[in-house]
């Protein structure tokens, strides 16, 4: 098994793609001026003391709760291969009970 930091780098690049979209006002449900708390899925980097290889396609999901709100915006990004960019594949908003209230169209 190859020992690399590729998976960590991939998740960092996914976060950068989301930040870029927000700064350009292209992230559905949140403007570049809004702030909040962002969380994401965690990847297991090791299993049985072996590093995990990166296998494409990869996906990364981010959850954003804007300051002063109880709804959660959820953004699923995907990267098809090492040679492609991270792309927003799906975006939706859930209420405080986790029920979907909005599905946004993404390009």
Image: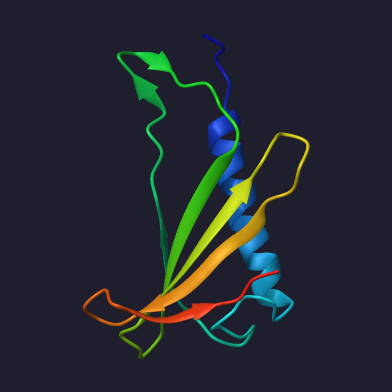
- Horizontally, residue 54 falls left or right of residue 22, namely left
* Residue at the extreme left of the image, as rendered: 97
Residue at x 69% of width, y 35% of height: 81
* Residue at the extreme bottom of the image, as rendered: 68
Residue at x 60% of width, y 32% of height: 56
Q: Is residue 51 above or below residue 27?
A: above
Residue at x 46% of width, y 21% of height: 52
Q: Position of residue 25 (x, y in %)?
A: 70, 81
- Horizontally, residue 25 falls left or right of residue 69, namely right
Q: Is residue 41 above or below residue 26?
A: above
User: In the rendered view, how is the structure colored?
Assistant: rainbow
Residue at x 54% of width, y 64% of height: 90
- Horizontally, residue 68 falls left or right of residue 85, namely left
In which quadrant of the rendered image does the C terminus lie? bottom right
Q: Is residue 57 above or below residue 47?
A: below
Residue 70, image quadrant: bottom left
Residue nearer the viewer, 37 or 63: 63
Q: Position of residue 10 (x, y in %)?
A: 60, 40
Residue 28, image quadrant: bottom right
């Amino acid at each position: 098994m190859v020992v690399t930091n590729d998976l960590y780098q991939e998740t960092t690049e996914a976060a950068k793609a989301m930040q870029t979209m927000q700064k350009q006002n292209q992230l559905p449900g949140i403007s570049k001026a809004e702030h909040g708390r962002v969380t994401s899925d965690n990847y297991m980097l090791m299993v049985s003391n072996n590093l995990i290889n990166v296998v494409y396609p990869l996906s990364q999901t981010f959850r954003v709760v804007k300051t002063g709100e109880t709804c959660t915006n959820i953004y699923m990004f995907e990267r098809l291969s090492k040679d492609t960019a991270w792309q927003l594949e799906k975006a939706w908003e859930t209420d405080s009970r986790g029920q979907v209230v909005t599905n946004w169209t993404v390009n």
